[in-house]
Image: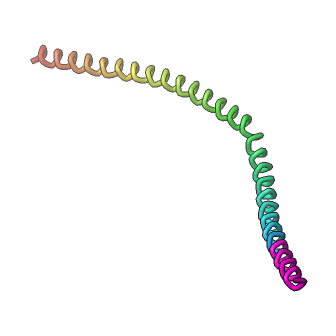
Amino acid sequence: MLTAVLVLNALIALLCFYMAWQLWKIRRVLAKVADTLIIVERRTGAVLRRGPNAIAKGQQGTRQLRQQYRQLEAQLQQAEQVLQLLRFGQKARRSRSRERGTLSQ
């Protein structure tokens, strides 16, 4: 009877040691995961803190580009008008020179 109790106690002790060992392994894994999450949180926080400034700079740059685009568009329209006037002038000169050529013959 005493042998049976000792064997049973030994089995229970071995089971408890096995469970403690498994819990210790789980604890190590969880500690590594927690450390990794802390590092990720710090890095993410640092990136996100810079976010609003970067967005504001991007918006400002976009505003400036749009303004420059409007100015260039106005200049392009003016240049197109000048070219149209020059073409009109060339056509008028050609037609006058043709008229003079036909009149002198």
Membership of 4 in magenta stretch: yes
Q: Is residue 43 above or below residue 64?
A: below
The residue at 74%/47% (across/down) is: 44
Residue 45 to residue 58: above or below = below
Of the 4 image quadrants, the one containing the C terminus is top left
Q: Residue furthest left?
A: 105
Q: As drawn, is 80 to the left or to the right of 51? A: left
The quarter holding residue 104 reads top left
> Which residue ends up furthest to the front in the rendered image?
1
Q: Position of residue 21 (x, y in %)?
A: 82, 72
Q: Main secondary structure of the magenta part?
A: helix
Q: Work out whether residue 76 or residue 52 is closer to the camera in this orientation and state it.
A: 52
Residue drawn where x is 31% and y is 22% of the image = 87
The magenta stretch is 1-16
Nearest the eye: 24 or 102: 24
Q: Percent x, y for residue 78? A: 45, 20
